[in-house]
Amino acid sequence: MYFRYGSTEVEYLKSRDKILAEVIERVGHIERKTDPDLFSSVVHHIIGQQISTKAQETVWKRMEEQLGTINASAVAATSVAELQSLGMTFRKAEYIKDFACKVQTGTFDLDRISELSDADAVKELSSLKGVGVWTAEMILLFCLQRPDIFSFDDLAIQRGLRMVYHHRKITRKLFEKYRRRYSPYCSVASLYLWAAAGGAVPELKDYAPKRKKPRKVEAVL
């Protein structure tokens, strides 16, 4: 399953921003996979924190082979040590186990999340161990397919904004200006900014100031 969007979202963004419209024309329709199962999406995102996509998928495949269907009951019945042996850190294994137990006992109501506003859903999800605001926002976008997600904490989004609009730095104030411009279809704008940041438009470059190399100091003997 892919993130759903079409001409309504695209034409709105084009009408609001001529520069982004050029990027949209160059890139074309973007297919980004989504995970409609909220439980597995949370687990998948916890696993993927601070590791490569390839490493994330390796761990995920091992979990599927070991547990079969990845749901609350299967994970809750698995020890932290067994989870860690699949290739994740001990802390991530603890977070995933804790999440599964909370869902199984009803301490955390997964079904309620889809009924909440974006802000409240982010707050609820980020109350879980191992789930920060950025992770919660990505879950809203790539699992619940919320249409208006725009994450300030996403470094690739900031890079995409710098590249598309020739900014040297993305401040919170500047970021909010673009959020207002793209809303209510920030999620689709995010897809195109990610594409730009990933090199989908080759002539775009990152205007962030280059870090100065430390000066070499010769020792005086």
Image (spheres, rainbow, N blue to C red):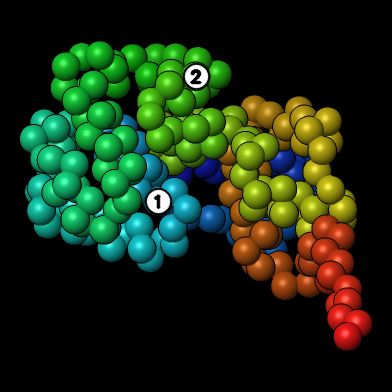
Q: Which callout, 1 or 2, points at the residue further toward the start of the chain?
A: 1
Instruction: Tell me the kind of residue under disc 1.
Output: Gly
- Helix, strand or loop for disc 1: helix
Quarter-of-image position of residue 149: top right
Residue 11 is labelled as: none
Marks 1 and 2, how far apart at CA: 20 Å
Residue 58 shows in the view: yes
Left or right of 193? Residue 75 is: left
Residue 8 screen position, x and y as percent: 61, 37
Residue 48 is labelled as: 1
- Helix, strand or loop for disc 2: helix
Instruction: Tell me the kind of residue under disc 2.
Output: Lys
Query: Of all residues shown, which one is farthest toward the bottom?
Result: 221
Count of residue discs = 2
Quarter-of-image position of residue 54: bottom left
Tag 1 near tag 2, CB within 8 Å: no
Residue at (66, 68) in percent of width and height = 199
Left or right of 168? Residue 187 is: left
- Residue 62 vs 124, above or below: the answer is below
The residue indicated by pointer 2 is: 123
Left or right of 123? Residue 111 is: left
Residue at (29, 17) in percent of width and height = 108
Residue 148 screen position, x and y as percent: 59, 30
Residue 165 screen position, x and y as percent: 84, 52
Left or right of 104? Residue 24 is: right
**The C terminus, quarter of image:** bottom right
